[in-house]
Amino acid sequence: MQKAPAWKIAAPRFVLALALGANAACSGSGSSGDASPSTSGSATGSTSSAPASPSTTILFAQPQDTAGIAGQLVVPPATNTPPPTDSFVLVLWQANRYQQNGELIPTAWDAGSQTGFTPVTAMTAQLGFEDTANTSTAQMEGDTVGAYINSQDLPQSSADQKMMITPEFIFAAGSQPMPFVSAQSSLSGSMDLQIPTAVGSDAYIVLDLLFKSVNGVRISYGVKVFHNGGDDATAAGYDQPSNSYMLNSALGFDDQYVTRASDSASATGTPWLGWTHFDWTISEAQFVSGLQYLATQFPAAVTSTDPTQYVLAEVHLNAEFHTLGQPAALGWSMRRLQISTTP
């Protein structure tokens, strides 16, 4: 069998889940899309991250786009080129079947009706599979990115298919940070998010932190913020295409691996319209707990639970669905993503 190019293992594909807790619906009443995730005792809606303290090092902050989306969306299956490093881009992991070159084209339809974000100049801020309403579309303008994906744009099939457009930042080799240098270290993240559209039982969004060990082991450490219909179980698994070992923890439901900040929403299973703030911290002890759990599940692969042996290689918002042979769709928008370490 022909070996795939080495860069292709970066494509995130969730293929195996081992439930660590009972499946249950996340917060949310099951009402229409104006419902928002809950926090403990107060409404959500904070739209900015707190200023970094003097002891905080910002590893990544979502940049302000001034040039439009052209050149900032990549389609590796169409170009056979890996996503760039040290650049914040949108990545589409399906070639456009309507275009011979497999790439997207400018489109002016109101994708904001599905993503919650309406750009000022749609033709420079949006690229879609077609220039028509309800086509799968990526958005980038100012401080916001978004995407609407619709299974109608996939090849016709009754088999399960996956679709995603993900915002991504890959640290260049040699400049990959080591977040957990001491027992007092912590890794924090925050973002504003809205998810007004979700169709299908396996549509979800996870903020994914990809770590690499000194011996090449890849750990996908996920902060789960949305699963349509609700799923607050912590899950782990192995993803063969990306050769990574995964741990996904629902924010606000299990603090063994990640802690929700007091001003943050919790994970939910109900779509909502309007900016909602998510904020979390992973301590050195929590990261070690995650490594220890993965080591028990995959003892031949995850052999080191020493956090100083891992660097942060990549940050991306894993926003996708599996069709399970049925129609599916997902619409979201995000701004102000920030990742930092303390001390």
Image (spheres, helix red, strand yellow):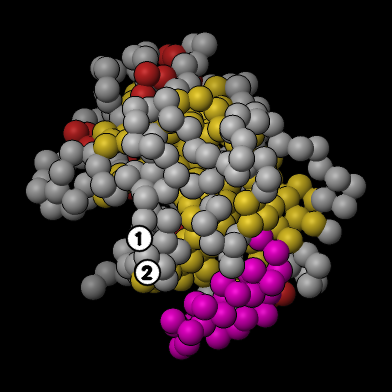
Rendered position, 53 above or below 247: above
Front tag of 1 and 2: 1
Do labels 1 and 2 touch, CB within 8 Å?
yes
Q: Along the line of sight, which residue is nearer the eye, 119 or 129?
A: 119
Residue positioned 52% across, 11% down in the render: 120
Magenta region: 282-307
Residue positioned 9% across, 48% down in the render: 158
**Residue kind at label 2, given as amino acid type:** Ala
Percent of width and height locating residue 126: 42, 22
Q: Which residue position holds label 2?
A: 19
- How far is mark 1 from mark 2, CA to CA? 8 Å
User: Helix, strand or loop at disc 2?
Assistant: strand
Q: How many marks?
A: 2
**Residue kind at label 1, given as amino acid type:** Asn
Is residue 182 inside the magenta stretch? no
Percent of width and height locating residue 180: 73, 67
Q: Quadrant of residue 21?
A: bottom left
Quarter of the image for the N terminus: give it. bottom left
Q: Which mark is residue 23?
A: 1
